[in-house]
Amino acid sequence: MTTAVIADLGRRAQSMLDALAALSDEDGRITRLYLSPAHRRAADLVARWMGAAGMAVSEDALGTVRGHLPPAVPGPLANRRYLVGSHIDTVVDAGRYDGTLGVVAAILAVEEIRARGLKLPFGLDVLAFGDEEGVRFPTTLASSSAVAGVFKQADLDGARDSAGVSLREALVGFGGDPDRVAAAAYAPESVLGYLEVHIEQGPVLEIEGRPLGVVTSIAGQSRYMVTVTGEAGHAGTVPMTMRRDALAASAEMMLAVEAVARAGRADQMVATVGRLSLDPGAVNVIPARVSFTVDLRAETDPPRAAAADAIKQRFREIAEARNVAFLMDRYHDTPTTPASPRIQAAFARAVEDLGLPVRRLTSGAGHDGHAMHALCDIGMLFVRCRAGISHNPNEFADATDMGLAVEALIRALTALADGQGEV
Amino acid sequence: MTTAVIADLGRRAQSMLDALAALSDEDGRITRLYLSPAHRRAADLVARWMGAAGMAVSEDALGTVRGHLPPAVPGPLANRRYLVGSHIDTVVDAGRYDGTLGVVAAILAVEEIRARGLKLPFGLDVLAFGDEEGVRFPTTLASSSAVAGVFKQADLDGARDSAGVSLREALVGFGGDPDRVAAAAYAPESVLGYLEVHIEQGPVLEIEGRPLGVVTSIAGQSRYMVTVTGEAGHAGTVPMTMRRDALAASAEMMLAVEAVARAGRADQMVATVGRLSLDPGAVNVIPARVSFTVDLRAETDPPRAAAADAIKQRFREIAEARNVAFLMDRYHDTPTTPASPRIQAAFARAVEDLGLPVRRLTSGAGHDGHAMHALCDIGMLFVRCRAGISHNPNEFADATDMGLAVEALIRALTALADGQGEV
């Protein structure tokens, strides 16, 4: 593999990303919400690319564009397929890499597989999902959930955007047929796995100087609302020893959250206090009540559960020592989605083939793979991005890194075909 | 001194406080803002009480009601006087003790001094100030500042309430003559000192089981706005070791503030973080920027200044270790107002006379004494109140404690007359 091939793949990826970036619901910035006019145009462009790459193109009831490449050789896998893709919807004022890179990389991989005459013994379906960001409707991953056969029918009429448009109405406007949702689901026995290329959306690969990373899991998440109740008092008249300061207690609790997460480094644990409000909130009044959120993630579920227990135990000790009360309410919890060892191994083999070090890391952010895991094995390849920035016009991935990702995707599929991805 | 006398004084104080509490600008709760109709009625009632107690009554340009009791015996102090009082304005939805107790206690003391035939060699002026809470106008302590000769003339037209009424207009409406502000000031050589009885507005006396406390100073205050700037990031994708979390840094800083204040216990130091805001404030985003206030007070100025330095030094260390930036902006600073050792000794002697332990403590809250200190020596006697609650309908002081306070005030004045207050 020459550097020139990688560079060429990178340039082609960049060109396709630029073309998609031009399709926006807003002038001057990239905003492509699910089932919007810009999404329609992006779906049509992706369909044209798929067709040009030699794929049979269709679009399912939820707006997912699908390009099918049949197996090139007969055999026991000939009636099964790998799914490869990502999403083409964006957040408001988005970058041009999040999601779209995975779709573009899949299309380029199919082009190359055909151009190089690689004979895969299984079919390939390239999927361009439409509802990964969950910005327009209260639901999220609707399109990949339908593909995986776990879409909730009630969302068709129950989920409405801020203008009051139901998901069903938006689908009809987009050209979909909401009555054919069930047909969007793959039969599990027909699917070998789901592969996705995506920018990291974090700083790890860049700081370590690695273009690609093999995802070990999509981290499970627990979110808590913590409420600490002490006692208000005059900032001038209550001695330090007589205070029940809800904010000082919360400060100690926040450091405990941080310490527990730091201790979970081997489990790629992260914990974040992102929101905090306090009452009464006057410069000269001791805070009586503080509420803050805790967002806790880890590579696997057991250490996350153990960390939550450790945090709660520390909260108890702090609350007791400071004579304050606390509530720790878990209001959101999603389990870890493990990446299949088999697909991880195929990606690792491909990365090694390219002469690159294999960096395995968990995905702290959510992805379509979370829904797809209900259908089949999943795996992801992360691409280095600048400063970990995402969901922002400053989002950036280097063209060469993207070329490496396309090449790694091709080689991972080849490895899976060779059975070399088995572990 | 019999318990019956104390109980009687307490009952009379309670009755007068109840009468004042009935004078409110709002139905159903006590709100008596400076120069309001309720303040007018309260000033008139206080004036009647003063007259009934045998005092010559007047009202100055700023609305301060003054009752004068001439010296009972000739001598070198006969053309000088002690001032005794407090304020009759309140916060919105106030209690019935803050301020008013000091005015009521002074009037009762004069009644008793005459009734008991105590011959004081100096004059006594009872003062009922009107602008201690600073709720209506942006200025505060306007009335005691005028008495002390430090009122800022510019506030007459510059200070306006929320309805746009200037202080000058409100004074005219109240019956005052804004052109006679200068005449409100006492000649310093005519004044021997200022004494004030006030509820503690803190929990110390109650927790220690002491009815009365001798104030050593009105604590100086420094207020800071601290801004901590780190870097936003995705709560799921940025490892703990790569974070520049402005809230985690602030948590450590807040605990440092608390630790420095706790270490300053001997200086009656208190520090409070009462307000905090953060940006962007989303559950899944690492906070980029946090702003919080620090309110720092101590019995004297040097330890407060040293504590501010220590806090800033700890902030520097924390910011450096966490790779965040911070600004610590001092936006408010008032020096400590020391209580005169002579007046402290007189109060202490009186408290001892009553068979009570002498508890000395600083006043963390501000008082008219701060302005009066520009004119003369000041001293304050604190009365135990329930749970430290003030500025609230739940504010409560026991009638017996109030009776003890009136008796202690009488005895402190006697002690000063005897020269027994000298140190």
Image (cartoon, coloured by chain):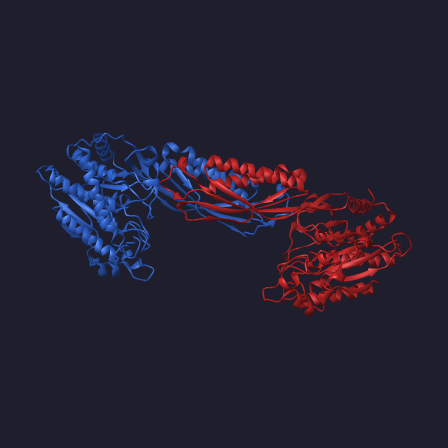
Chain colours: A red, B blue
Measured as percent of width and height from the top left, residue B63 is found at 22, 54
Q: Residue furthest right?
A: A74
Measured as percent of width and height from the top left, residue B126 is found at 18, 45
Residue A3 relative to residue B219: left or right? right
Closest to the observer, A6 or B104: B104
Residue B262 relative to residue A394: left or right? left
Could one spot residue B385 in this view of the protein?
yes
Closest to the observer, A33 or A92: A33
Tell how many labels: 0
Quadrant location of the C terminus of chain B in the rendered image: top left
Q: Residue furthest left?
A: B74
Quadrant location of the N terminus of chain B in the rendered image: top left
With respect to residue A236, does A12 lie above or below? below
Residue A54 relative to residue A180: left or right? right
Measured as percent of width and height from the top left, residue A205 is found at 70, 46
Closest to the observer, A419 or B186: A419
Could one spot residue B379 in this view of the protein?
no
